[in-house]
Image: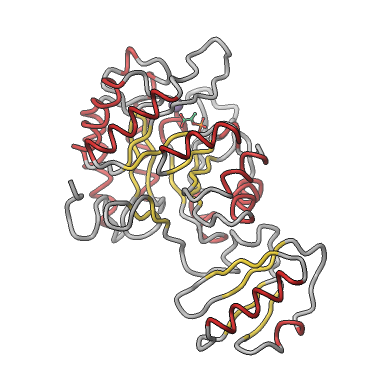
Amino acid sequence: MLVVMKPQATEEDIRRVAAKIEAMGFRAHLIPGAQRTAVGITGNPGPLDPAEFESLPGVAEAIRVSKPYKLVSREVKPENSVIQVGPAEAGVRIGGPELGIIAGPCAVESREQLLLAAEAVKKAGARLLRGGAFKPRTSPYSFQGLGRPALEALAEARRQFGLMIVTETIDPENCDLVEEYADVLQVGARNMQNFSLLKRVGRSPKPVLLKRGLSATLEEFLMAAEYVLSEGNYNVILCERGVRTFSDHSRNTLDLSLVPAVKSLSHLPILVDPSHGTGRRDKVIPMARAAVAAGADGLIVEVHPDPDRALSDGYQSLFPSQFQELMNQVTAIAAVLGRSTQPRSGMAPS
Ligand code: PEP
Ligand code: MN
């Protein structure tokens, strides 16, 4: 249920509604909006009586939310959510007019490799740096990531280049460490339904980048996001990264129609990963262009200073010069849609 407050409701009115919800043993979620605040209720085993809330001062109405994903749904929040990554002065806002462009290697392989990648993606205009410290690999014998030294290297890149750090957390225990370094906690496709991890990142102060599972439906994807929001972390960025199909010309099939589908059902921003979505370097730039044209709020792209020697996903990683080309092209496409790859003031802060 959603308790919609009147535009002139006072903070005291809102507090009273939240206190009543908590006293009933349920959870109250404050959802501020442009016109009015709403209070979402979760944890109730069955339908509640709207009259219980509509008699309270400052309440406009209490409505049932029809979708199974409550807090993620546009029914509870009509405006797009804009997620603040990093500090307000130096960070990046994802979901507004600026596209969130995350780029970097699949995995951090060494300090040198990461700093070279960071320098290249920064120069091309990316404002967020990706790089796995812990890699969920199909084979237990494949490179699993460097762990803490990789996180140290990411922090060094942030210091040197002012890039925000996006890196994956693979289980709830591991999250304690990753959270100390990351600006955004990535939950990978293989973990989209790792419910204990979703609950753990739901209690984190850091924004979460949630990737779509390998064969997840839109509803399953949004329900996974709901796990995070239901724990109190409303800063979730969704990411389409391709799904498993019978196609054999690409690693996965990038499902770009998910972008408008998410936009109509949810207020959360959605990025697209054309790297894992195609698995082939020559398909990354075309699908990045298409993703931006489809209305994605940004991209996550694998870029490596020496892709042929990469320890993971080299065949889908762009050379730095190709990433520059991608940025030039998506910047032009973004402009058609009234968006940009840089903050409104023009150049990225250095
Ligand atoms: C990644 O981003 O490196 C990754 C492992 O992605 P996914 O979880 O989408 O496979
Ligand atoms: Mn990868």
Q: Residue at x 28, y 21 (%)?
A: 113
**Colouring of the image:** secondary structure
- The one nearer the camera, 281 or 232, is 232
Farthest-out residue, right: 46
Left or right: residue 219 compared with residue 141: right
Query: From the viewer's perspective, is residue 1 above or below residue 316?
Result: below
State the residue in front, 73 or 277: 73
Residue at image point 58% right, 49% down: 202
Measured along the vertical axis of the image, is residue 159 above or below residue 319? Answer: below
Residue 272 placement (x, y as % from top left): 43, 42
Residue at 68% x, 79% y: name it.
Answer: 62
Give the answer, above or below, for where 180 lies relative to 28.
Answer: above
Position of the N terminus, as image quadrant, is: bottom right
The mark tally for this picture is 0
Q: Position of residue 320 (x, y in %)?
A: 24, 28
Q: Position of residue 192 (x, y in %)?
A: 61, 38
Please provide percent x and percent y for residue 219.
65, 50
Picture quarter containing residue 164?
Answer: top left
Q: Nearer the viewer, residue 249 or 172?
A: 172
Quadrant for ligand 2 reads top left
Residue 345 is left or right of residue 141, and the answer is left
Locate residue 167: give its quadrant: top left
Q: Which residue is pictured at 36% across the width and 48% down the height?
A: 292
Decide if residue 299 is on the left or right side of residue 259.
Answer: left
